[in-house]
Amino acid sequence: MSATIDHILNKAVNGERLTRADGEALMACRDLHKLGRAAHAVTMRLHPEPYRTYNIDRNVNYTNVCAAVCDFCAFYRKSTDADAYVLPREELYQKIEETIALGGNQILMQGGMHPSLKLEWYEELLADLKAKFPTVNLHAFSPPEIWHFHKINKLPLETVLQRLKNAGMGSLPGGGGEILVDRVRKELTKNKALTDEWLEVSRVWHRLGGRSTATMMFGHIETEAERIEHLDRIRQVQDETGGFTAFICWTMQPGHKMSHFTEVGAFEYLRTQAIARLYLDNVPNIQSSWVTQGAKIGQVALFYGANDMGSLMIEENVVASAGTVHHLTLEQIRRCITEAGWEPRQRDVFYNLVDDRPAIEAAKRMAAKPKELTLAS
């Protein structure tokens, strides 16, 4: 078994593509350090630069009303619930203004699959925000939301995405992926995009010239072979389009109807991320998930396949609703990178480096006046 694993790891390190069988063999390997060393070697081949990156954005959930029912989600509400909401425009303006003041250049704008909002509402929202904040990238919606727009508006998927792009949508988050295997999706969710639908949204968006991320939430009812199937489906689309900029995986946070599950720990997180780096030979970037794992494991993840610390996340509500809230300041994110031996550099969603001085100066002002705004990650 050890000789087989060594052979597979050497293939990946040397840039050879792993097969599904190779991936499944790695999933059976519990030698975390061996997997990590190989994943780090691949990362250093792909990213020999002396820096590691992060970005600054705000996760704005414009509504918590959702027609889907996901067992793992503690955030969604029915439209008749007392605490159901659609954010007023002025509140959105304020959130974006605060993000810009902190050196952010992007809004990650996602919500539930609202049963009554039509495509025109989303077009008006994007156009309004883009007119008011032209330099801010609107990293908006998710494949399940887009599929929902396509269904309720009875319009071709390409038409929906082109209209949103014309209105100001800059990039597509990879949310709602969970595990891209229909057996898992049908058991965990109702009224939500299945595997081929999630992938088709990404595929069409890429064909229109758009870029997106890919994600995986694991550690629940999926098998290890299904984790590899998930990675394989992403790799297939990336072969076709080249449109995924990054991959992010995280562990399911027990809560809501999933409270009977025991959360998988840092060992399984690091092991799975390392295997993802080895398998996804055509996805350029891997983000650490300190939001679910905390600062220390988020930092260690830089040696297990990640080349990016992810976002400062000025605001986050969905993971927090499940009871997991890790807080990191900009200084702490930069320190995590520096202590690991790299130069910290701020980027945008397309992985272009940006001037990080405004954010650093804003962080200093925040430290001097800590009560002005609380960073929630």
Image: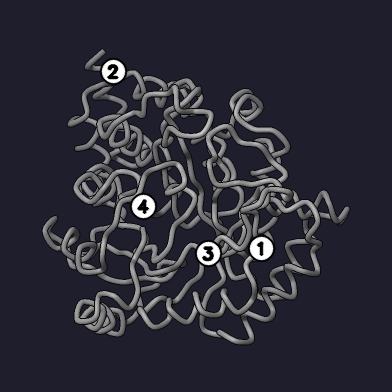
Q: Please tell me whether mark 2 or mark 1 is closer to you in this view.
A: 1
Front position among marks 1 and 3: 1
Mark toward the start of the polypeptide (1 vs 3) = 3
Q: Distance of mark 2 from mark 1, alpha carbons? A: 53 Å
Vertical comparison of 57 with 11: above or below: below
The reply to whether the C-beta atoms of the residues labelled 1 and 4 are less than 8 Å apart is no
Tell me the number on the disc at residue 60: 3
Q: Are marks 2 and 4 in contact (CB under 8 Å)?
A: no
User: Residue 100, located in which quarter of the rendered image?
Assistant: bottom left
Of residues 21 and 92, the one nearer the viewer is 92
Q: Nearer the viewer, mark 1 or mark 4?
A: 1
Q: Residue at x 64, y 76 (%)?
A: 89
Amino acid carrying label 4: it is Gln
Residues at marks 2 and 3, CA–CA distance in whole angstroms: 46 Å
Observer-nearest residue: 217 or 162? 217
- Residue 246 visible in the picture: yes
Name the mark on residue 287: 4
Residue type at mark 3: give it: Val
Residue position for label 1: 86
How many numbered callouts? Answer: 4
Residue at 51 percent of width and 79 percent of height: 94
Estimate the spatial distance between the alpha carbons at disc 3 and disc 4, rounded to whole Å: 20 Å
Amino acid tagged 1: Val
Frontmost of labels 2 and 4 is 4
Task: Name the residue tied to disc 2.
Answer: 4
Mark 1 neighbour density, 10 Å: few (under 14) some (14–19) many (20 or more):
some
